[in-house]
Amino acid sequence: DEIPSMARLLAAGQRGEALEVTPAYSSCKAANIPGKGRGLVASKVIRDNGLVLLEPALASGASYAEVAEQLCGLVEGPDGCDATLLRQLLSLSCWGESPTSVPPLPESDAEEAAAFMKREPPNRNPEEFEEAKKLLLEDAPNPDAAADFAPRLRRRLELVARSNAFRSAADPLGALAWHALSPAEQRDIAEREPARMPSPRVFLFLRAALINHSETPNAVWLVAGSLILVRAIRPIVPGEEVLLSYWPDIDSSDALSRGMYEGFGMSCSSVGGAPEFEFSAEQLAELAALKGAPAAVASRLAAVGAGSDVAVAFDEAAAALSATISKAEGVLPKSLRAFLEPRFFQAQLTLQQGAILTARGDADRGSQLQKLAVKQIRSALHILEGAWGKRVLLRLLFAFKGALRPSPAMMMAVGSGEVGEGGTEDFSINLAKQARISPEDVRSELERAVQEVFGDELLMPAVLSKCGIPE
């Protein structure tokens, strides 16, 4: 069957529609991965931006418990039990356990390995279902555990969902537009039109559940219309493992400090190279200061009194931020993603300084600073290593709107009630209308960001329109 276009997938997500498509599995196959348990490897050459996997969700819900309930209904449904699906689900790793604890693939049986974790027609054979149940009950503490099968299965499948499901908004384009709003705009919509708020959901995909996490991924994923689409971000050769970032917009150091690796049974050595894992105490201190810089800028500007000179306040904020960035660049790799927000803030403060000079009659210097800010933004982007992702796209959207907004890690801390660097208060500092860049100023960078997030740069007008930004 024809693979749906990205525009069609996004449209389905916006409508809340579950597209009926035939899964595309042929580019990859299941394999045993040393030290990781199982994974997916390329079965043929996959070109840059090529399709790795397209798969409809087996189950989805607002929580892991809801997903587990759906899975139980599929295993023991009104039409009978499904022995094949039960075996598949029980062979997936559980939250809090090592991924190497799952049984290895039968590599001697090529046919069975090729079909591993593909959705199969229901197997209603009661004898085979009883055999499959033993996989769950074999470690039961008493001989009457069979009577406890249903609650045991529900608990097990909730752990399976926590370890293998993907968390995403059903409407990724709508979610992007939501995150591009200010806190005040979000509160207003939540009160007046709650249906417009993004609805994060949990999706379980049998085949995609096998893909392992890496801090240096070679593929990216997107969920829309109850489908997951996995694309390569560089050529992948046959036999090479397909790797995703489970949290593409979160730095390695933030993931480590929040215990995000532990629940998946991952370690620093198993997730690929990340320079933060090798930092000294001095470097970690500078990294913390760098991550706290955007909130420090916001606090400084928020404290400016009504009678204060705005130009002086922005000059002082810009000088302090530049000093923080310069000091961090002296001890940290300059390509770290942690530099993204501070460097964008630096450029946006430069834009504001230029706008103030223009408003006070010095149009020449104001124009010079605007050109410098555009150069700073481009430099901040092109020095980054790896995929740009939604994090970069949001930075550009904030620059188009003239808003200083926090980093993804801080947004996550605010949403969960945790304490993040620089405090837990969300913020949006609105700059002058003249302190904005236009999409045309950074067109090539914007096209690349849209391409990397949605797989098609031609969607740029739709992205800008959805986010309320004139092209």
Image (cartoon, rainbow, N blue to C red):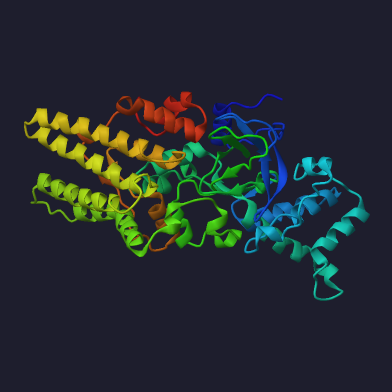
Work out whether 277 lies above or below 2.
Answer: below
Identify which residue is drawn at 34% across, 44% down.
Answer: 340
List x then y, in percent, for residue 272.
Answer: 53, 50
Quadrant location, the N terminus:
top right
Left or right of 329: which side holds 137?
right
Work out whether 413 lies above or below 174.
Answer: below
List x then y, in percent, for residue 314.
Answer: 16, 46
Of the pair 380 and 23, the residue shown nearer to us: 380
Of the pair 312 and 325, the residue shown nearer to us: 325
List x then y, in percent, for residue 48.
Answer: 55, 30
Work out whether 262 lies above or below 168.
Answer: below
Q: Total label count?
A: 0
Identify which residue is drawn at 73% across, 58% down.
Answer: 102
Q: Residue furthest bottom?
A: 142
Left or right of 377: which side holds 418?
right
Q: Residue furthest left?
A: 361
Residue 82 visible in image: no
Residue 149 visible in image: yes
List x then y, in percent, for residue 74.
Answer: 77, 50
Quadrant location, the C terminus:
top left
Report which quarter residue 24 is drawn in. Answer: top right
